[in-house]
Amino acid sequence: MARIVKVSARLVNIPVETERTDAIQAFLVQETPFVEIETDDGLVGRGYSYTIGTGGSAVLALLHDVFQPRLIGADARAVEALWHTLWSSTRATTPGTLTALALAAVDTALWDLRCQRNAEPLWIAAGGYRQQIPAYDTEHGWLHLSEAELVDGMRSLVDAGWTAAKMKVGRELLPEDVRRVRRVREAVGEDFTLFVDANQGFTRSEALRRARAIEPFDIAWLEEPLPADDREGHAWLAGQTGIPIAVGETLNTIAQCVAYLSSGAASIMQVDAARVGGVTPWLKVAHAAEAMNIDICPHFLMELHVSLAGATPAGTWVEHIPQLRSVTRTEVQVEAGVAYVPDTPGLGIDWDMTKIDEFTVSPILTV
Ligand code: MG
């Protein structure tokens, strides 16, 4: 028994390192629900999730009003039982993103405790597959960049030894997207892996037009071409273009992810540990993907996902968007397009609690 004696939650606003824009939104601050769980053996587990700027206060309220009281007195080792208790307590009112983000903040703290208790790094506790994962960069592909800025940035990646990157598409006119993709392909050369991301910005007909128009440039995946709830549309599009379709960052349950996988709507699964409710459901999606011979390339959260991608044979690429450097004492090591999985006990995220305090924008709600 490792009895939970104290749980605190707060909202931390972490600034972004660069302006991030895509076809439907801009990301200017990361709202970070941050949870600490203390057990009677003296350990403290720390977990988190995120929003890209809206809804954080609702997640915090859900944590404080519903989840935290239910955790007190429970055995922190029974992670599955706690996950299901919390999930069931909100099933009638808030299924979807808010519940998933609140669950993830708790679940990652419980995994941190589990790893600390067993003196294991997350990549071992969650499976233990490999310690080096190919990484691709997203920080040089934002939609607001001019063509010249985009091309210069992509060329700088090649010069620094990167082998893969992602660029946003969804400019107003199709020829703009095509010209940007063509110029990037010319700049990076044919041996470079190039992904594009539409962030749910297209209708079915427009997605097909744009996919066909960029097919000649060897695109390794087209990400979220359609609204995330249009699973049938993604399956239809996958049958119309040779570009693999990547989805998953906007799915909130295991069942949604598996429906995408089993219907041919996802050639690449980008399940996000925060938006799907934590490490516990993330691993189930990863195992389902492995069973169907589909790659897992998790969305964002590289500081956490690098360990999860290293836990499973399905983990193929980690997305490089540094986001926690201002609140941690160490950072994910990435060299020449390879991310190195941290080997320290816990989640592998070395929080700087002075910085966390500095960026905290809510009361610290404790039970
Ligand atoms: Mg995306």
Image: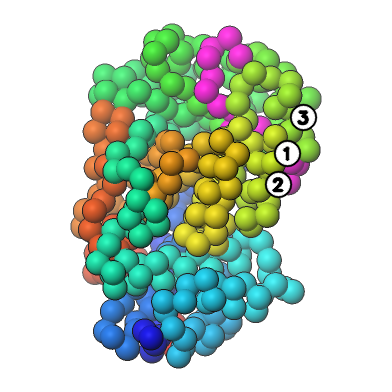
Examine the rendered structure and indicate whether residue 226 appears above or below residue 32: above
| Gap between marks 1 and 3 measured at Cα | 10 Å
| Gap between marks 1 and 2 measured at Cα | 6 Å
Question: Magenta residues, as a range?
Answer: 215-231
Residue 113 appears anywhere in the view: yes
The residue that appears at 45% across and 90% down in the rendered structure is: 73
The residue that appears at 31% across and 77% down in the rendered structure is: 44
Examine the rendered structure and indicate whether residue 292 appears above or below residue 220: below
Name the residue beneath numbered marker 3: 236
* Circle 1/circle 2 CB separation < 8 Å: yes
| Gap between marks 3 and 2 measured at Cα | 14 Å
In which quadrant of the rendered view does residue 348 lie? bottom left
Q: Earlier in the sequence, mark 1 or mark 3?
A: 3
Task: Locate residue 36 relative to residue 352 in the image: left or right.
Answer: right
Name the residue beneath numbered marker 1: 263
Please state which amino acid type lies under the numbered disc 2: Ala
Name the residue beneath numbered marker 2: 259
Please state which amino acid type lies under the numbered disc 3: Trp
Task: Locate residue 276 relative to residue 105 in the image: left or right.
Answer: right
Is 16 contained in the magenta span? no
Please state which amino acid type lies under the numbered disc 1: Ser
